[in-house]
């Protein structure tokens, strides 16, 4: 039996990060049922209840230290933890986890991370210094590996895939209940629209409303999917604007588990997404998707899968969303074939993350 500490962006109600946590916990328990799993979380009581794990508050130095001392191995990630786009404080927090583990001589596996952007010179120096102390590094895309190499990191860097590719959907009856509660059923031709408030220009939101009207004219059923509670402000505002245009508001599905999210995505025809894990779970579900280039991780994933992406609305001139999305739908069979070919590879690469963790765990807990 060993004690494994998981550190990431957990306990914030973000479906993407919870998908990482869920898939990692399930895979570790499948391989080693006797493992004691410990999670740093923003809401430790909720995390303990949901996953049946020990959990400590991620912002309490006392609790983090207690969790660290208990652990035999630290899993750092996945997700986009090492970046300063959110804030420099965020980067310092995550580097402090790696440095604290080094102080207590706890081996760290950097686990399926997406790296960057780290724009500050100091941030890049501190990141390189911290990563030179870890046992192993896996990243979820080649561009993250290249970024670390450019920083001067000399450790071996393994390119794998996001842990969410190991996720399994909820049972059909659970998914059906969710759809029915929103006036939908499994036979509905659903197009998922998962938005994020980025203070986009008005013309972009106008094009989303035009897309909704166009999809309805084609007999499809557009529906909003909120990957995080903060996304509801935008979807609610758009629904109010639709009502003012004498159009029915869209169903809004939110506050569901990662497994439920994967299950409902599998019953969709297409997806427009502005968060990375909307696209990752769409790929896992095998439905053609279109991303919106909000940050480099979305661009990297769309390029790696061969699926299309829209430019960043704040930086690019007006583009025709309906035309771009229509092209996605017209080439649906091609994109489905691409996803089918890549899915087994991505799942295998995601499993490599777990295999690497287990091989290092064997060294500390033989």
Image: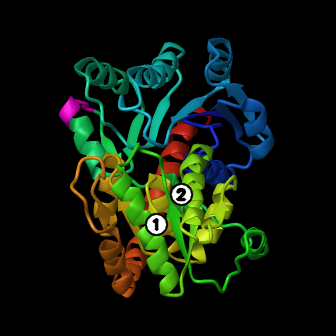
Q: Is residue 333 left or right of residue 222?
A: left
Task: Say whether residue 268 is magenta.
Answer: no
Label 2 environment density (alpha carbons within 10 Å; few <14, some 14–19, many ≥20): some
Q: Position of residue 195 (x, y in %)?
A: 49, 55
Q: Position of residue 99 (x, y in %)?
A: 45, 18
- Asked which quadrant contains residue 185, the reply is bottom right
Q: Position of residue 97 (x, y in %)?
A: 51, 22
Q: Is residue 80 above or below residue 349?
A: above
Q: Which SS does the magenta portion mostly show?
A: loop
Q: Position of residue 149 (x, y in %)?
A: 22, 37
Q: Are marks 2 and 1 in contact (CB under 8 Å)?
A: yes
Q: CA distance from mark 2 to mark 1?
A: 8 Å
Taking the spot 66% from the left edge, 53% from the top edge, the residue there is: 26
Q: Is residue 231 left or right of residue 312?
A: right
Q: Is residue 103 left or right of residue 27?
A: left
Which residue has dot 2 on it?
Answer: 238
> Which image quarter holds the N terminus?
top right
Taking the spot 68% from the left edge, 82% from the top edge, the residue there is: 186
**Of helix, strand and loop, which one carries label 2?**
helix
Which residue has dot 1 on it?
Answer: 209
Taking the spot 56% from the left edge, 45% from the top edge, the residue there is: 17
Q: Which residues are magenta?
A: 150-154
Label 1 environment density (alpha carbons within 10 Å; few <14, some 14–19, many ≥20): some
């Amino acid at each position: 039996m060993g004690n494994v500490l998981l550190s990431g962006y957990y306990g914030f109600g973000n479906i993407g990060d919870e998908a990482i946590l869920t898939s990692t916990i399930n895979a570790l328990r499948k391989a080693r049922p006797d493992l004691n799993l410990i999670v740093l979380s923003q809401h430790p009581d909720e995390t303990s209840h949901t996953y049946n794990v020990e959990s400590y508050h991620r912002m309490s130095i006392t609790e983090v230290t207690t969790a660290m001392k208990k652990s035999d191995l630290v899993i750092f990630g996945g997700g986009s933890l090492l970046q300063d786009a959110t804030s420099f404080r965020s980067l310092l927090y995550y580097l402090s986890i790696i440095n604290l583990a080094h102080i207590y001589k706890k081996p760290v596996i950097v686990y399926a991370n997406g790296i960057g952007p780290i724009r500050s010179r100091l941030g890049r120096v501190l990141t390189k210094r911290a990563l030179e102390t870890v046992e192993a590094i896996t990243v979820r895309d080649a561009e993250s590996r290249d970024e670390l190499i450019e920083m001067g990191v000399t450790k071996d860097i393994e390119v794998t895939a996001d842990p969410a590719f190991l996720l399994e959907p909820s049972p059909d009856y659970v998914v059906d209940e969710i759809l029915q509660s929103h006036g939908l059923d499994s036979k509905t031709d659903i197009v998922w629209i998962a938005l994020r408030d980025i203070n986009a220009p008005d013309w972009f939101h106008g094009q989303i409303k035009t897309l909704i009207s166009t999809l309805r004219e084609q007999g499809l059923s557009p529906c909003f999917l909120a990957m995080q509670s903060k996304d509801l402000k935008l979807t609610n505002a758009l629904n109010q604007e639709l009502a003012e245009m004498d159009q029915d508001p869209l169903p809004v599905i939110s506050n569901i588990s990662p497994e439920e999210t994967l299950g409902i995505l599998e019953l969709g025809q297409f997806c427009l997404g502005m968060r990375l894990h909307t696209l990752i779970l769409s790929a896992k579900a095998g439905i053609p998707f279109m991303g919106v280039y909000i940050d480099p991780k979305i661009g990297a994933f769309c390029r790696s899968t061969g699926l299309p992406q829209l430019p960043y609305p704040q930086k690019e001139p007006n583009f025709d969303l309906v035309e771009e999305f229509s092209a996605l739908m017209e080439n649906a069979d091609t994109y489905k074939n691409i996803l089918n070919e890549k899915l087994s590879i991505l799942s295998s690469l995601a499993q490599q993350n777990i295999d690497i963790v287990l091989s290092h765990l064997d060294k500390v807990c033989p």
